Amino acid sequence: MEVTRTLARYVVGSNLNDIPEAVQKEAVRSLVNWLGCAVGACRHETVDRALEALAPFSGKAEATLMGRGEKLDIFLAALLNGISSHVFDFDDTHLKTIIHPAGPVASALFALSEHMAISGADLLHAFILGVEVECRIGNAVYPEHYDVGWHITGTAGVFGAAAAVGKILKLDEQQMVWALGIAGTQSSGFREMFGTMCKSFHPGRAAQNGMLAAFLAQKNFTSSNQVLEAKRGFANVMSTARKYEEITENLGKTFEVALNTYKPFACGIVIHPSIDGGIQLKKELSLTGDEVTKVELKVAPLVLELTGKKTPQTGLEGKFSVYHSLAVAIIHGAAGENEYSDACVRDPNVIALRDKVEATIDKSMRDDEAIVKVTLKDGRTSEKHVAHALGSLERPLSNADIDAKFNGLVTDILGEAQTAQLLEAAWSILSLNDASEISHLSVPR
Amino acid sequence: MEVTRTLARYVVGSNLNDIPEAVQKEAVRSLVNWLGCAVGACRHETVDRALEALAPFSGKAEATLMGRGEKLDIFLAALLNGISSHVFDFDDTHLKTIIHPAGPVASALFALSEHMAISGADLLHAFILGVEVECRIGNAVYPEHYDVGWHITGTAGVFGAAAAVGKILKLDEQQMVWALGIAGTQSSGFREMFGTMCKSFHPGRAAQNGMLAAFLAQKNFTSSNQVLEAKRGFANVMSTARKYEEITENLGKTFEVALNTYKPFACGIVIHPSIDGGIQLKKELSLTGDEVTKVELKVAPLVLELTGKKTPQTGLEGKFSVYHSLAVAIIHGAAGENEYSDACVRDPNVIALRDKVEATIDKSMRDDEAIVKVTLKDGRTSEKHVAHALGSLERPLSNADIDAKFNGLVTDILGEAQTAQLLEAAWSILSLNDASEISHLSVPR
């Protein structure tokens, strides 16, 4: 069974016309969501520190650090945009594998689009293929690969970036096999790094390293022909699960990007149904928070295990507190980056409501389910049962939701008019003659 | 137990004066050996292809591709020199772990020496510490880590490069902890790549990535504080062995570089005792090969398992043929790169003698042992028992042997006069005010 070669052959032979329109549309949604995250976080200190360390060593300054405008060589731009797009933990999620698929692939492709002419359609096609490659490889090794400690967005993402860049470089089948091999032998990234700057470093490096693999393969730099399936290849060395059929079956028939999801809220995904319920109650009852005397929350055990922090002290800790998150949902009707600032976490009004939240677990509930009940000063009560959180596959964000998320992330950086222009260009990527227009529009004028 | 921090604290606090002179001398021998390998292989097609792919993206062209003179940014120079130094498989070996220690560390340091002023003594000190870090980490996880399929020169080497560069950058303890963390989360490289260009890519990338880690840490880019020992850190994720005391005990008292060894022959190390015996017989009996009617070889089982190829077709295959190797030892009295050319492997005289070699295994023999017996046309026989191969810890190469190896590798590149000058500078590194003199002297005038 030739696993690596089968995958490479598919990528090399794929035509955009053979990919269903619905899949292409979901890919556009993925790109719009990624772009909002990348631009929105571009001033994060993680980006600042990496830029300060590495910019002095940049090669030809041809690719844009999105949202800012510093120019870097395409490898460094891929790294920095990859960091930026993940640092808020607000990017897309392939729920089957917890891969954040866009970061490694899109960060490489947009950087590349400032080095060589790439149409929007070609970029979207390469993006779909890159996501396909990384998520199929993820499917083959998940969850065992993740459980042992690998940050799968980095370890699988590097293959996706290599395949996507390799498609643009028009690698032949053998070169694509080598590109996947060179990518695989760089596969890395520990979950141990969560909570540090290295977490977002992983998708950035996956983008950069995958691109490196494709450029080396283009010059016939050789690797193993069986990086995925060899006795000492990726699946055997880095996982105990090796479901190779997940990689080789139904190629060109099913598309992993169609299963992509987008977070409406800037925090751990298990908190999302609780926030969803809180926002629904706020809207229906026009709550401000003051009128609430008690909030009762019922959730699956995992929710409190992962996010049971009752008295968060910082914005980052707030992201792991279902108590804080439910309070801001009721007070602000939102849970974006603003609601996870240090200031918001220390706001007396938020703290007062947070302390009124009583959370209990119910083992019969799913992780994406919540029941929120408020009791008001006038004695009224109201309850919401969220069966599937907004942003799940069952209740995907609408395009309008994605717009709202994008605006919330980007307006502070670009202002309203330019944000609208960038958003319009991103939705229209299929008709762009030159995909680099996106990068240029991301820079404040 | 703070494993990572203990190691970082030692590196940050180390003074060259506290390192015994004998250790420093062995480090100089390691550097001389590394330099010969790096310069000798600089025209290898692996180097050519990587250079062609990546030079267009180089940053400030300040560091030398050794032996050639192309200038690259320090990260690319570290990569390329790291590739070059390993591509002949002729570099140093830390026999306890099969790490080739110099490649990842020296390739980074010499590139760095063209970016900032580094004295020869400071470079040697950082080199000793880098080797200490990578080999101690290797000791902690070997052999299980290697057995599962990791190319330990890459996976451990990245830590060594980070520590060495971090020492030159004068990182404080916390920054050094982060540097090791950022290095660790890039740790990668499959043994599956052996026999392809990616094998030498591994030490090159270890050099480049470790340097990246140190520069990021210098700007306070954060990582986990326990990359080595955390539940989801390096040792637990990438090995089943976790002998942390190998990392933390006797720091500053024992030195791994003192255990470094140098190959006299350009092939797999298990063939070395056979070659050694062959050369001894050639010298004693003034053999040309024609007079030999039979060669009987007795070796440990592993020798034929790894290098039992009877009819190699290419130079590379010749490196895995104890038959070819013994034949050239008797005919040429040598086993350098020339004896592993495609032409030599196809030489009718060599093939004729190779076919007269009868190899048998003896389970009571060690891997570094061989018995070689020749029978001549006139009926005489002669036998050599090599208890430990030349180049082993028990029979280390003399400085003169290292000189001869260096001259064999470098003279074709630099000519005799400049080779002598470079060699002299390398032996004198402790007294160089500016270590970059080595890089400059490596370029043909």
Image: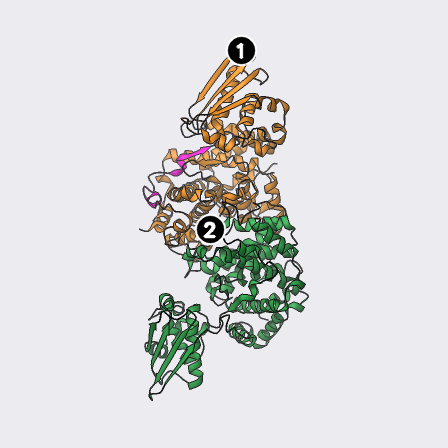
Chain colours: A orange, B green
Q: Tell me if label 2 and label 1 are in contact, CB under 8 Å.
A: no
Front residue of B137/B413: it is B137
Q: Residue B136 location in percent, x, y?
A: 54, 58
Q: What secondary structure is found at the residue carrying circle 1?
A: loop
Instruction: Please determine whether, in this image, residue A56 is positioned above or below residue A425.
Output: below
Residue A69 appears in the figure: no
Residue B187 appears in the figure: yes
Say left or right for A109 vs B250.
Answer: left
Q: What secondary structure is found at the residue carrying circle 2?
A: helix
Give the amino acid at mark 2: Met
Give the amino acid at mark 1: Gly
- Residue B238's tag is 2
Front residue of B395/A394: it is B395
Q: Residue B27 location in percent, x, y?
A: 59, 66
Residue corresponding to mark 1: A379
Residue that lies at the very extreme toward the top in this rendered image: A378
Whether residue B334 is in magenta: the answer is no
Front residue of B227/A396: it is B227
Instruction: Please determine whether, in this image, residue A136 is positioned above or below residue B68.
Output: above
Residue at x 60% of width, y 24% of height: A350
Magenta stretch, residue numbers: A243-268
Q: Residue A270 location in percent, x, y?
A: 47, 31
